[in-house]
């Protein structure tokens, strides 16, 4: 999805306020961006990775199935997926 790529590229020069606004835009997209965010989470680093992870946590339940599938397909990603799922379930509880 182009929106996710655009936001990730804008994060490279973002201050804190802009970063928060960009994260909010991602979260507002809801489940529509989850597959792309899970895919990006496996390759991006640093600030981008943090924003993608937090967006998935904030989107919540819609992220869980995609994270589980990614963990099955990519064993190196498994611990990240488990952590995010536990965070989502912690918020939802």
Image: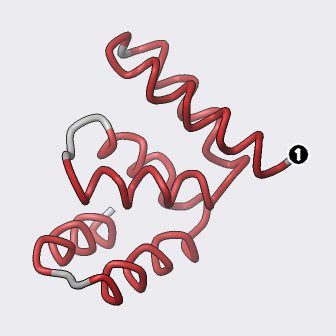
Rendered residue at 49%/57% (across/down): 54
Location of residue 72 in the rendering, given as x and y in whole percent from the top left corner: 48, 13
Up/down of 9 relative to 72, above or below: below
Secondary structure at badge 1 equals loop
Location of residue 22 in the rendering, given as x and y in whole percent from the top left corner: 37, 80
- Horizontal arrangement in the rendering, residue 72 relative to residue 15 (left or right): right
Up/down of 77 relative to 50, above or below: above
- Horizontal arrangement in the rendering, residue 61 relative to residue 46 (left or right): right
Which residue is nearer to you in this view: 35 or 20?
A: 20
Rendered residue at 37%/61% (across/down): 51
Asked where in the image residue 77 lies, by quadrant, the reply is top left
* Quarter of the figure with the C terminus: top right
Rendered residue at 76%/51% (across/down): 91
Badge 1 density bin: few <14, some 14–19, many ≥20, Cα 10 Å: few
- Horizontal arrangement in the rendering, residue 29 relative to residue 41 (left or right): right
Location of residue 69 in the rendering, given as x and y in whole percent from the top left corner: 53, 23
Rendered residue at 30%/50% (across/down): 49
Residue, disc 1: 93
- Horizontal arrangement in the rendering, residue 18 relative to residue 46 (left or right): right
Q: Residue furthest right?
A: 93
Asked where in the image residue 52 lies, by quadrant, the reply is bottom left
């Amino acid at each position: 999805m182009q929106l996710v790529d655009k936001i990730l590229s804008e994060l490279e020069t973002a201050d804190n306020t802009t970063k928060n606004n960009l994260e909010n835009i991602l979260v507002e997209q809801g489940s529509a961006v989850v597959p792309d965010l899970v895919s990006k989470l496996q390759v991006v680093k640093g600030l981008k990775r943090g924003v993608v992870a937090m967006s998935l946590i904030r989107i919540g339940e819609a992220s869980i199935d995609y994270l589980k599938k990614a963990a099955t397909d990519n064993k190196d990603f498994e611990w990240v997926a488990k952590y995010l799922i536990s965070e989502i379930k912690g918020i939802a509880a």
